[in-house]
Image (cartoon, rainbow, N blue to C red):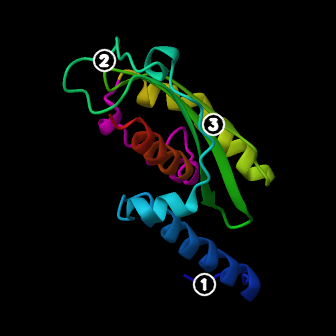
Amino acid sequence: MIRTTAVPRPVRAGGALVGVLGMVALAGCAGTTTPAADAEETTPATTAPSSSTATGTDTGSIVGSAYTDGTYTAEGSYSTPESVETVEVTITLESDVVTAVEVTGDPQAAESKRYQSEFIGGISDEVVGKLVDDVSVSRVAGSSLTSGGFTKALQTIKSEAAA
């Protein structure tokens, strides 16, 4: 096929760079990092578990639960071609099941604002009602990079909620 217009070299190089960065970011979603690496890359902003667990009386969880019931918040970061973005994730757990999720973002780039907004609009349908250990998101409402930040925050929450 012969092109009638040549694509300038900087555009081709930029496209290749975006592709490589996208593959690196998606490789981080594969769960091959160690918990220690995730802890270094995330800055947790935690809240105390719900009042029933804060007093040491675990009235809502079933015997053998891996996680303490409560509401947990953590922050996860991910890289885009333009910037490093963060999302704050708040999850409520009852008997190891996600009963509520809230994600807030502080996008630095215009494109990130769009993707974070789409991710936030679709994440509840993907995780609420599932066992927290079964939650695995790679692409939500067209957003794949935001999932990386969500996954890092979820790992921090799981380590904090471990019974």
Whether the magenta-drawn stretch holds residue 143 is answered as yes
Q: Residue at x 59, y 32 (%)?
A: 47
Using the rendered image of the protein, determine whether residue 8 is visible from the camera's viewpoint: no
The amino acid sitting under disc 2 is Ser
Mark 2: secondary structure: loop
Q: Position of residue 89 (x, y in %)?
A: 58, 37
Q: Residue at x 43, y 66 (%)?
A: 27
Q: Residues within 10 Å of mark 2 (few under 14, many from 20)?
A: some
The amino acid sitting under disc 3 is Glu
Please say if 69 is above or below 151: above
* 66 to the left or right of 92: left
Mark 1: secondary structure: loop
Q: Position of residue 46 (x, y in %)?
A: 59, 38
Q: Position of residue 2 (x, y in %)?
A: 60, 84
First in sequence: mark 2 or mark 3? 2
* 33 to the left or right of 134: right
Q: Residue at x 48, y 59 (%)?
A: 38
Q: CA distance from mark 3 to mark 1?
A: 38 Å
Q: Position of residue 67 (x, y in %)?
A: 33, 31
Magenta segment boundaries in residue numbering: 130-148
- Image quarter hosting the N terminus: bottom right
First in sequence: mark 2 or mark 1? 1
In the picture, the disc for residue 118 is: 3
- Return the residue at label 2: 61
Name the image quarter holding residue 8.
bottom right
Q: CA distance from mark 2 to mark 1?
A: 65 Å
Q: Residue at x 57, y 72 (%)?
A: 21
In the picture, the disc for residue 91 is: none
- Return the residue at label 1: 2
Q: Nearer the viewer, mark 2 or mark 3?
A: 2
